[in-house]
Amino acid sequence: MASVPTSPSTVSLAESGPTSEKALPTRVLAMAAFFWVLLLPPQFNAQIGTVVLPAYRILLFAVMLLVIITIIRGQLRWTLPDTLVCGIGLWIIIALFATMDVETAIQGGGSQFIDIVISYLCGRIAIRSPRDFRIFLVLIAPALGFIALMLALESITHSFIVQPLASAVTGQPVRLGAVERLGLMRAPGPFPHSILAGIFFGSFLPLYALSGLRGWPKITGFIASLCSFFTISSAALLALLAGFGLIFYSWLTEQISGISWRLFVLACAVVMFVLELATKSGAFVLLVRYAALNSVSSYNRILIWNHGSASVRNHPFFGVGYNDWERPFWMLESVDNYWLWLAIQYGALPSILLLAATVVAVYRLGRAASHSPRADRHLRMGVAISYSIFALGIISVAIWLSALVWFYALLGITVSLGMAHRSDRQSQTAD
């Protein structure tokens, strides 16, 4: 197990004192193992009738009873974001019963509840302190490094590698189409779409850069996050640029008095307000127009926003379910905006609840960081930056399967680390 020596800027994975030789927490090991399963290609998915069962979903279903028992025993300190995320899962089920037949509502609602709520609660339960999260980052670094290498090789050689190998094992077909940009192929790795690989790997840049780790885990995780470039996705590239920018700003807050995160948030709010008032298109359209790598995808996202918003206005409570949403006949069915996709399918409430959970979680984590020792403060800021960029990035990305599960698990981790600063030492004694 890699560790870092205690210093003003880094901490050891093993705390000094009576817990220094304690075995690694089982819950953290289980969370790391679950993360490795998230990286299995779709060729390993099982299917029963019309129900798709990825390996991770089978695991989530298997541990659901343990999660419930943990909550009943009072081993999880319940918070407002917990209620909000559970509200998302329950409302999706209610909305589907209002728009679809019973069988579809049970299957679709159950799958969404497991992917969203159970993965979130697993993150909440597994990670209880900065030490837990550092151990988790060390344990998943080899998996990230291997898949990142595959992304680079796929992109440079213009050939799929991961999923054909999985297909040779399982016999399940590869459903991918090669797309080239900037002289490279958009690499998907084990994901059903390259854009999912990009947003997934891009989220790890702030986590490893500010983790306080040293040596091969930090180097591996950091380089793996940079390999999101090989997905040639605007969302991934923006995640990397935003990650570097916010890491630099975090450094500035410690070097120059008067520069703070409150000032940053206020400045962003003012800029958004001015753009909304001073432009005909609005802040969102401007962001999509100039952030996309090509004009076609930019135009499509603007059309999706305009027609998708109209669909939400027409079906504000329960959405349209899995039925077709209103749009011109020549537009594709896909919605490249997770926030909007939630509202279109299940009504506006899930998006509102997710926004509230996101704001509360990031705010509390930032406040916890300000009261933490330097190394833990950096780690907490890394998590806050990572999740914030992820939440902003899915304005132009629809996420599903592994990427969706990691998004909500990271939200659970964000919530836990936002409340753990008062009891970090105590949490390290629990398995």
Image (tube, grey):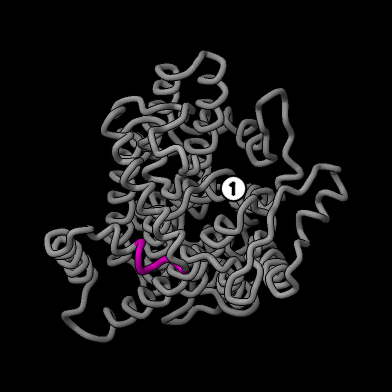
Q: Of all residues shown, which one is farthest toward the bottom?
A: 255
**Residues in magenta?**
288-293
| Residue 123 place in picture, x, y as percent | 50, 47
Q: Nearer the viewer, residue 362 or 354?
A: 354
Relative to residue 177, is residue 294 depicted above or below?
below
Q: Which residue is mark 1?
A: 402
Q: Nearer the viewer, residue 91 or 335?
A: 335
In this image, 306 relative to 382: left or right?
Answer: left
What secondary structure do most residues of the magenta stretch adopt? helix
- Please give the name of the residue rendered at 56% of the width and 66% of the height, measured from the top-left corner: 14
Q: Is residue 289 magenta?
A: yes
Sort mark 1 into few (<14), some (14-19) or many (20+) by Cα contacts within 10 Å: many
- Please give the name of the residue rendered at 55% of the width and 20% of the height, measured from the top-left corner: 104
| Residue 192 place in picture, x, y as percent | 64, 50
Which quadrant of the view contains residue 339?
top left
Which quadrant of the view contains residue 3?
bottom right
Q: Is residue 334 magenta?
A: no
| Residue 280 place in picture, x, y as percent | 18, 59
Answer whether residue 197 is visible to the viewer in this image. Answer: yes
Q: Amino acid at mark 1?
A: Ser
Relative to residue 225, is residue 173 depicted above or below?
above
Relative to residue 64, is residue 289 depicted above or below?
below
Q: Nearer the viewer, residue 417 or 224?
A: 224
- Please give the name of the residue rendered at 49% of the width and 43% of the height, measured from the top-left corner: 332
Which quadrant of the view contains residue 106?
top right
- Please give the name of the residue rendered at 59% of the width and 70% of the height, measured from the top-left corner: 181
In this image, 416 relative to 363: left or right?
Answer: right
Q: Count the marks: how many?
A: 1
Answer whether residue 141 is visible to the viewer in this image. Answer: no
